Image (spheres, rainbow, N blue to C red):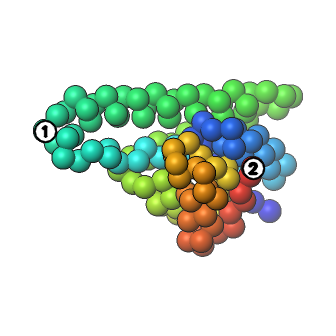
Amino acid sequence: MFKHILLATDGSKASDAAAALALELARTHGAKLTAVYVITPYPYLGVGESNAYGFNAYMVAAQQHAAEAHAKVTALSQQGVSKFDVQLRVVEDSGSARGILHTADAEGADLIIVGSHGRTGIVRLMLGSVANRVVSESPVPVLVVR
């Protein structure tokens, strides 16, 4: 049924649950699986422009978080009887929802899987604003995992 599944990952517990389900669905349907981590733009524009260290430290930390989130997905994909190859993507300079939607379009995904709540501070207390926006704006089906 599905040929290409896009998994949005951020290393959170909900994201880990989404990864497990995405891998199961990809194996079941013989689908390709791409895991995307979106690095949101540097939040301190005025400071970053005058202080490159702040921007560089932010990007190094963001790349490290992306690598850790991808490592979790890769570890899950290597468990069990059949190993599974997952494509890993990092998107920069985009809001989370926009980055997920753009990647789904660019990769030709026919299903997006996201966790219900991510790691985005106070925003995570709401009903997962990133997941909500992806559901609202996606032209392809979206599966939200708790």
Amino acid type at mark 1? Ser
The percent coordinates of residue 115 (x first, y second) are 67, 50
> How far apart, in angstroms, are the residues tagged by discs 2 and 1?
41 Å
Identify the secondary structure beneath mark 2.
loop
What residue does disc 1 label?
50
Q: Is residue 31 above or below residue 49?
A: below
Left or right relative to 93: residue 74:
right
Amino acid type at mark 2? Arg
Identify the secondary structure beneath mark 1.
helix
* Mark 1 Cα-neighbour bin, 10 Å: few <14, some 14–19, many ≥20: few
Q: Residue at x 82, y 32 (%)?
A: 82
Left or right relative to 50: residue 114:
right
- State the residue in front, 57 or 46: 46
* Residue 146: image tag: 2
Q: Residue at x 84, y 28 (%)?
A: 80
The percent coordinates of residue 38 (x first, y second) are 47, 46
